[in-house]
Image (tube, grey):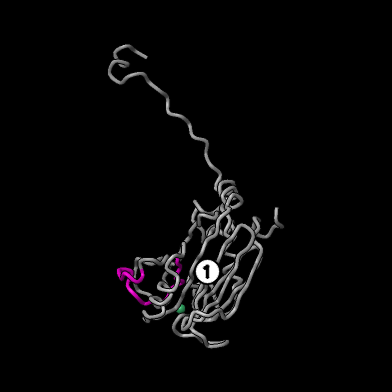
C-alpha cells in the first residue's frame, strides 16, 4: 500500500470472506440442537368476534408464538391482533396481511401458514403438502426454497384437522367462533414442541378444556424421504 494511502486510511485489512451458510444445513443443526420446550398457540376464523382471541391470550399469556390462520376480519392495527403472526383469509381486506407466512421457530422448525382457500382445502390437504416441498418453486420464495418445512398451519374449513403426512405436521385448529362440523365446539390448538415430540391439544375455546390430543415423533427428515 502506498505510504500516503496508509496515512489517510490506516493499514488496509482485506474484508474477511464469510463462508456462505447453507440454509438446510443451518436449519438441520438448529433443529437437532434444540433442547428446550416451545409453546405455540394457533387460532383461526374468528370472523370479527374478539372475545375468543382475548380469552386465548388471557389463558396462555406465556406462549412463545401465536399464529392466526386468517379470516379474523379485524384490522392489523388492533392491539388484539398484535401478538399474532397472521395471514389473509378469503374474507380479510387488510392489506397488511399476506397470503402466506413463513416462520423459522427457535427450535429450527419451519412453519408455513396459509388460510387454505387457494389450495382447495375443503376437498383435501394434498395441495398444501405439494406446495410445502422444496421444489414448489412458484409458491415458496427463493430464500426459503431449500429449507425444510416441518409444520403447515391452515384454516378456512372451520374443522379441526391434525395429522402427519410425508413428514409434515398439518394443523387446522378449527374456528374459534363458528365451528362447522364434528363436535361443533369453538376451538383452538396448543402445540408443544420438545426435542422428541410434537404434542397437539385441541382446546374448547369456551372453558379451555382439552377436546382432543395428538402426539407425533419429531424427527429431522427431508420431505418425501425417510428420516436421516
Ligand atoms: Mn375462510
Task: Pinpoint residue 31: horizontal percent, then vertical percent.
Answer: 58, 53
Residue depicted at x 46% and y 84%: 206
Residue identified by numbered label 1 = 153
For residue 21, above or below residue 144: above
Q: Residues within 10 Å of mark 1 (few under 14, many from 20)?
A: many
Q: Is 13 in front, or is 90?
A: 13
Quarter the N terminus occupies: top left
| Count of numbered circles on the image | 1
Q: Is mark 1 within 8 Å of ligand 1?
A: no
Examine the image and state in which quarter residue 46 appears.
bottom left
Q: Is 187 in front, or is 70?
A: 187
For residue 150, above or below residue 120: above
Task: Pinpoint residue 107: horizontal percent, then vertical percent.
Answer: 54, 55
Examine the image and state in which quarter residue 12 appears.
top left
Which region shows up in magenta? 66-81
Examine the image and state in which quarter residue 73 appears.
bottom left
Q: Is residue 146 left or right of residue 85?
A: right
Secondary structure mostly taken by the magenta-highlighted segment of the chain = loop
The answer to whether residue 38 is visible is yes
Task: Pinpoint residue 32: horizontal percent, then vertical percent.
Answer: 61, 51
Residue depicted at x 31% and y 71%: 78
The residue sitting at the top extreme is 3
Task: Pinpoint residue 83: horizontal percent, then vertical percent.
Answer: 38, 66
SS for tag 1?
Answer: strand
For residue 121, above or below residue 20: below
The answer to whether residue 132 is visible is no
For residue 35, above or below residue 160: above
| Residue 99 forms part of the magenta stretch | no
Amino acid at each position: 500500500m502506498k505510504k500516503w494511502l496508509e496515512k489517510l486510511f490506516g493499514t488496509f485489512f482485506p474484508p474477511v470472506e464469510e463462508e456462505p451458510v447453507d440454509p438446510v444445513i443451518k436449519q438441520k443443526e438448529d433443529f437437532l440442537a434444540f433442547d428446550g420446550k416451545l409453546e405455540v398457540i394457533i387460532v383461526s376464523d374468528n370472523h370479527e368476534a374478539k372475545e375468543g382471541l382475548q380469552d386465548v391470550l388471557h389463558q396462555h399469556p406465556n406462549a412463545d408464538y401465536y399464529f392466526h390462520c386468517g379470516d379474523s376480519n379485524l384490522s392489523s392495527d388492533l392491539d388484539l391482533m398484535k401478538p399474532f403472526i397472521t395471514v389473509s383469509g378469503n374474507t380479510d381486506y387488510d392489506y397488511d396481511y399476506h397470503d402466506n407466512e413463513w416462520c423459522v421457530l427457535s427450535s429450527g422448525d419451519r412453519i408455513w401458514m396459509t388460510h387454505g382457500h387457494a389450495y382447495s382445502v375443503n376437498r383435501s390437504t394434498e395441495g398444501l403438502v405439494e406446495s410445502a416441498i422444496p421444489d414448489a418453486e412458484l409458491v415458496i420464495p427463493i430464500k426459503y426454497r431449500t429449507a425444510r418445512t416441518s409444520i403447515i398451519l391452515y384454516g378456512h374449513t372451520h374443522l379441526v384437522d391434525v395429522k402427519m403426512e410425508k413428514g409434515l405436521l398439518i394443523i387446522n385448529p378449527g374456528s374459534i367462533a363458528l365451528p362447522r362440523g364434528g363436535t361443533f365446539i369453538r376451538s383452538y390448538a396448543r402445540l408443544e414442541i420438545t426435542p422428541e415430540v410434537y404434542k397437539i391439544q385441541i382446546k374448547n375455546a369456551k372453558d379451555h378444556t382439552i377436546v382432543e390430543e395428538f402426539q407425533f415423533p419429531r424427527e429431522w427428515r427431508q420431505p418425501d424421504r425417510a428420516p436421516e
